[in-house]
Image: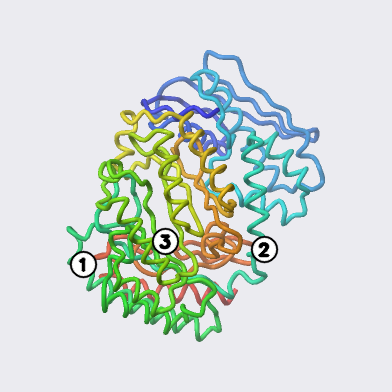
């Protein structure tokens, strides 16, 4: 059972080979929110790589050393890169074990895996023809992942592999970031600027976005690059209203043929932004997939986290979407919101399931440094047992409703060392979510805070981020466009 990360400042000195220093520091900072590496008890780390295997030693000052000998790495299926990684993996396990024993911090269900995309590890091993049994052994012995999380990984990976395409650069997917929201949610650290304080920037932002859409769209067309999916996120794209929204969607149809893509999504995350006119505009321009995200169905919690809508407005938004026959509706819920218990979450989950979405994404509250709740983590006292109970309830209820997990990702300082999981009815899985999360397709990012991911055939990824601030984006858009077109051309020519 996972123990929440320590929130009090703590200090360690590190003595380790230079190539292992980052692994030691990264492991410690995944366990403690605030760490001073200039003083404190000494942690000594060493590794001996011999023909017989790898011997790893971790010692905390004042305590007995931890040692592990690994002969399995000598199997012929591993290369030099694998061997270097295995040393770091054993170091991470040693540091987690030693500090866990001293501070009473047990390994969580994900073991020593701290990355955002644990599924990528399994995909890479399958690409190299590792058997399921071999992958299971690695997840158990090297990464200490629980049986339950291993089953989740295999279920998600099996669902995803049929979505991977032979060419990572044709077709591509397009993400458009609209960095405006009605208000800023207390848990949020994304590019989301409240209209009350930043609404005067919308017009210039949209003019700049139009330039970027036209320039990049013309480039892709000239290179013969097709678009598989278009995703409008943010922020809340449906804060853009009337003619402005219609013009934006028309541009996406004109330059990316969005209405004919396999998937065309608009994040209408805030249900109060959905009205009859907005729904009609999206339907007219071929939007297929809509996200309506209540996060909770309790008005008291919505008010507490800074969302200025009610549960009734969520229901009304669903009525509008269903009556206009959108092909797929997604809905998000967050488990672990402040003040909510298991019964509260169960009630929200039951109500959302009854609204009949095609996807439900279950997020575990992440206490991000940039968010309000991240700054007050010590006061929230979120209980890890409750988080695990909520996650188990979500899995059981959604599978009974005919949904199955199809993508997942993790975040730092996430409740109960859990994960965010997207569930979907068969055939309703989001193409964009899978391609973006697994990084098996080039993603062209346009707009505020959007990240372009240029994926090479060997699955190496080069990222380029647009400015989050809408004013900065509008001011720099011409230079940004020139740089992006050059980067895309260079990438496609390799």
**Mark 2 highlights which residue?**
162
Compute the Cα span from label 3 to label 2: 24 Å
Looking at the rendered image, the disc whose residue lies closer to the viewer, 1 or 3, is: 3
Residue at disc 1, secondary structure: helix
Compute the Cα span from label 1 to label 3: 25 Å
**Mark 3 highlights which residue?**
291
Asked if the residue at tag 1 contacts the one at tag 2, i.e. Cβ–Cβ closer than 8 Å, the answer is no
Query: Would you place residue 282 above or below residue 431 in this image?
Result: below
How far across and down, in percent of the image, does residue 471 sit? 24, 65
Residue at disc 2, secondary structure: helix
Q: Nearer the viewer, residue 241 or 51?
A: 241
Asked if the residue at tag 2 contacts the one at tag 3, i.e. Cβ–Cβ closer than 8 Å, the answer is no
Looking at the rendered image, the disc whose residue lies closer to the viewer, 2 or 1, is: 2
How far across and down, in percent of the image, does residue 122 sit? 67, 49
Q: Earlier in the sequence, mark 3 or mark 2?
A: 2
Residue at disc 3, secondary structure: strand
Query: Would you place residue 344 above or below residue 128 in this image?
Result: above
Q: Nearer the viewer, residue 214 or 148?
A: 148
Determine the residue positioned at 48% across, 52% down: 361
């Amino acid at each position: 059972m996972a123990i929440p990360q320590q929130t009090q400042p703590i200090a360690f000195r590190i003595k380790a080979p230079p190539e292992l220093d980052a692994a030691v520091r990264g492991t410690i900072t995944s366990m403690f929110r605030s760490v001073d590496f200039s003083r404190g008890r000494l942690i000594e780390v060493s590794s001996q790589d011999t023909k017989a295997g790898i011997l790893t030693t971790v010692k905390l000052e004042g305590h007995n050393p931890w040692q592990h000998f690994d002969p399995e790495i000598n199997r012929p299926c591993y290369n030099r890169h694998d061997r270097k990684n295995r040393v770091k993996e054993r170091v991470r396990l040693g540091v987690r074990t030693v500090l866990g024993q001293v501070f009473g911090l047990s390994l969580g269900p994900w073991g020593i895996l701290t990355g955002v995309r644990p599924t990528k590890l399994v995909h890479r091993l399958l690409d190299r023809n590792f058997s399921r049994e071999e992958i299971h052994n690695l997840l158990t012995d090297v990464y200490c992942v629980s049986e339950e999380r291993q089953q989740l990984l295999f279920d998600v990976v099996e669902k995803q592999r049929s979505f991977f395409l032979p060419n990572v650069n044709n077709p591509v997917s397009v993400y458009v970031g609209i960095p405006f929201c009605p208000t800023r949610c207390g848990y949020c650290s994304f590019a989301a600027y409240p209209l009350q304080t930043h609404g005067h920037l919308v017009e210039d932002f949209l003019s700049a976005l139009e330039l970027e859409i036209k320039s990049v769209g013309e480039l892709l067309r000239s290179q013969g690059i097709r678009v598989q999916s278009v995703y409008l996120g943010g922020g809340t794209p449906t804060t853009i209203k009337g003619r402005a929204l219609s013009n934006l969607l028309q541009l996406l149809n004109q330059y990316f043929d969005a209405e004919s893509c396999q998937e065309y999504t608009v994040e209408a995350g805030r249900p109060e932004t959905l009205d009859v006119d907005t729904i009609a505009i999206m339907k007219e321009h071929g939007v297929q997939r809509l996200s309506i995200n209540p996060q909770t169905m309790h008005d008291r919690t919505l008010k507490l986290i800074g969302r200025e809508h009610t549960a009734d407005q969520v229901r009304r938004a669903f009525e509008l979407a269903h009556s206009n026959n959108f092909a797929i509706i997604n809905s998000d819920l967050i488990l672990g919101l402040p003040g909510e218990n298991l019964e509260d979450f169960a009630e929200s989950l039951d109500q959302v399931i009854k609204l009949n979405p095609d996807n439900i994404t279950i997020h575990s509250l992440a206490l991000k440094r940039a968010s309000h709740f991240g700054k007050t983590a010590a006061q929230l006292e979120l209980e890890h047992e409750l988080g695990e109970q909520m996650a188990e309830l979500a899995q059981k209820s959604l599978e009974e409703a005919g949904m199955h997990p199809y993508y997942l990702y993790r975040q730092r300082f996430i409740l109960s060392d859990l994960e965010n999981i997207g569930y979907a009815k068969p055939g309703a899985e989001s193409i964009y979510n899978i391609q973006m999360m697994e990084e098996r397709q080039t993603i062209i990012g346009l707009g505020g805070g959007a990240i372009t991911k240029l994926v090479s055939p060997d699955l190496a990824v080069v990222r380029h981020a647009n400015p989050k601030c809408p004013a900065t984006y509008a001011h720099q858009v011409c230079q940004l466009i020139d740089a992006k077109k050059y980067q895309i051309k260079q990438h496609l020519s390799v």
